[in-house]
Amino acid sequence: MLEAFVLGMQFDAPIGIVKLLGGSTDPDDFYDAVGITPSYRPGYGTRKKKSSTKKKATKASSKKLIKEFDPELYEQMYGVGSDIYDAKQEYRKQIKDALQE
């Protein structure tokens, strides 16, 4: 930073040009090479919204966790012969019958 003060110039443009010649596709390198200050670049001054709540596990991911850690419990809850399995099969049969009509 002291060198920039002594020489009276900023090194952002030459550094940006070198990065572009090196194959960089980062928009910030282009803006540096052209000489656009950060305050005039798109998105300057906007803050990204922080998530205030923790993402809840979906039903599918909960089922995957149960299947991974306790396969016997998974089979009791969702396997062949369980209430959920029978209800799904009945629902699928009703849909199939309705589509055939």
Image: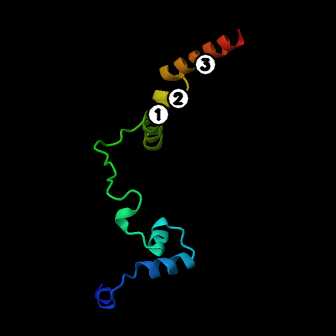
Amino acid at dot 3: Arg
The residue pinned by badge 2 equals 79
Q: Residue at x 50, y 67 (%)?
A: 26
Q: Quadrant of residue 25?
A: bottom right
The residue pinned by badge 3 equals 92
The residue pinned by badge 1 equals 74
Q: Quadrant of residue 90?
A: top right
**Does 44 sit above or below residue 36?**
above
On the picture, is 81 further left or further right than 70?
A: right
Neighbours of disc 1 within 10 Å: few (<14), some (14-19), many (20+): some
Residue 99, position in %: x, y? 68, 14
Amino acid at dot 2: Gly
Residue 101, position in %: x, y? 71, 8
Name the one closer to the observer, 20 or 71.
Answer: 20
Residue contact at pointers 2 and 1, CB within 8 angstroms: yes
Q: Residue at x 47, y 77 (%)?
A: 16
Spatial distance from mark 3 to mark 1, Cα to Cα?
21 Å
* Quadrant location of the N terminus in the rendered image: bottom left
Name the one closer to the observer, 90 or 8.
Answer: 8
Task: Assign a secondary structure to mark 1.
Answer: helix
Residue 13, position in %: x, y? 44, 78
Amino acid at dot 1: Tyr
Mark with earlier residue (3, 1):
1
- Please tell me how many numbered marks the rendered image carries: 3
**Does 45 sit above or below residue 4?**
above
Task: Assign a secondary structure to mark 3.
Answer: helix
Q: How is the image coloured?
A: rainbow
Mark with earlier residue (2, 3):
2
